[in-house]
Amino acid sequence: MTQIANDTPTAAPVGVSGGVLLAALSAMTFGLSGPLATGLLDNGWSPGAIVLTRIAVAALVLSPFTVVALRGKWRLLRGRATQILMYGVLAVAGAQFCYFSAVAQMDVGPALLIEYTAPAAVVVWLWVRFGQRPSRLTVLGALVAATGLVLVLDLISGADLAWSGVAWAFAAMIGATAYFLISADTESGIPPLALAGTGLVVGTVTLGLLAAIGVLPMHATTAPADYGFGSLPWWAPLLLLGVVTAAVAYATGIAAIRLLGSRTASFFALLEVVFAVLFAWVLVDQFPGLPQLLGGLLIIAGIVAVRLGDRAVPA
């Protein structure tokens, strides 16, 4: 890989607006995964079984689109094999495995908060590696978004922390950071759909190996999954998890990152937490409180500030 990461967003207004829409769609579809998985978790499915099935279904769904996107240019995959392996192992399998390892030892809220320090890690990387010093408005937006994230995750009331869980959460943050930085590389020549499809295949193989050696517990049932609106057969949420929250989410996410740049897109990804709270309200009757609603508004305000500040940073 010649560059991690090319953070020069497109200058075309249509490209920028399209990137914003794609980023919002990616965050929304990623945010649906938690509430959808809740119904399966409550019925005896292990997190590992859900994640492996989700990524495998996504890889299968995107496979024909990957072939079409490459248009016979298989040499791109050979020339960028290291990049694809890094994406699949770190951004897909690593982020998923480390996050669930973290929540197995600590509360979900602080684990998510640590993982979602990835936007700050992206800013630091671009500053240290490429000399792209963040503007004051970008820093202010990051602080506002971080405050909103704390409120949305309801961390004010206290949380159960474990050092081993914190370590796993930081590892998940590294995987999330790799997702933004590798996806932003426009010099590779690999189309977004092809990177998503091949990365998901690598991620499936990696998670499958972890399951085979017993590191990733696998438990599943065929009992219906219960939600606030009723029950669904076990395969329905799995299909939605694979098609919507993985295939669509990764493909649109990569396209958005290339249009907006890794810095701005990483802050847009914080909307995933907001959407997750809203979907939890609709699907599993977890009504958001006033602090969570206020936190959502702060996240959006922070994203706007980062986007405005991003324009002041020379590419």
Image (cartoon, rainbow, N blue to C red):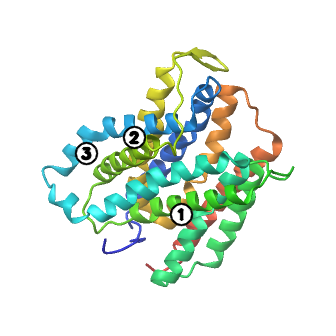
Q: Residue 262's x, y, as percent?
A: 47, 65
The image quarter containing residue 204 is top left
| Residue carrying label 3 | 66
Residue in front for this viewpoint, 13 or 33? 33
Which amino acid, by three-letter code, is at mark 2?
Answer: Ala
Query: Which residue is at 56% across, 15% downward?
Result: 223
From mark 1 to mark 3, how far is it between C-alphas?
A: 26 Å
Q: Please tell me how many numbered marks the rendered image carries.
A: 3
Q: Tell which circle, 1 or 3, labels the residue nearer the N-terminal end.
A: 3
Q: Residue 153's x, y, as percent?
A: 74, 48
Q: Residue 122's x, y, as percent?
A: 53, 69
Tag shown at residue 174: 1
Is 288 on the left-hand or right-hand side of 199?
Answer: right
**Quarter of the picture holding the C terminus:** bottom left
Label 1 vs label 3, nearer the camera: 1
Query: Which residue is at 72% across, 63% downward?
Result: 144
Tag shown at residue 259: none
**Quarter of the picture holding the N terminus:** bottom left
Which amino acid, by three-letter code, is at mark 3?
Answer: Thr
| Residue carrying label 2 | 247
Q: Is residue 112 above or below residue 218?
A: below
Q: Give the structural element (helix, strand or loop) at label 1.
A: helix
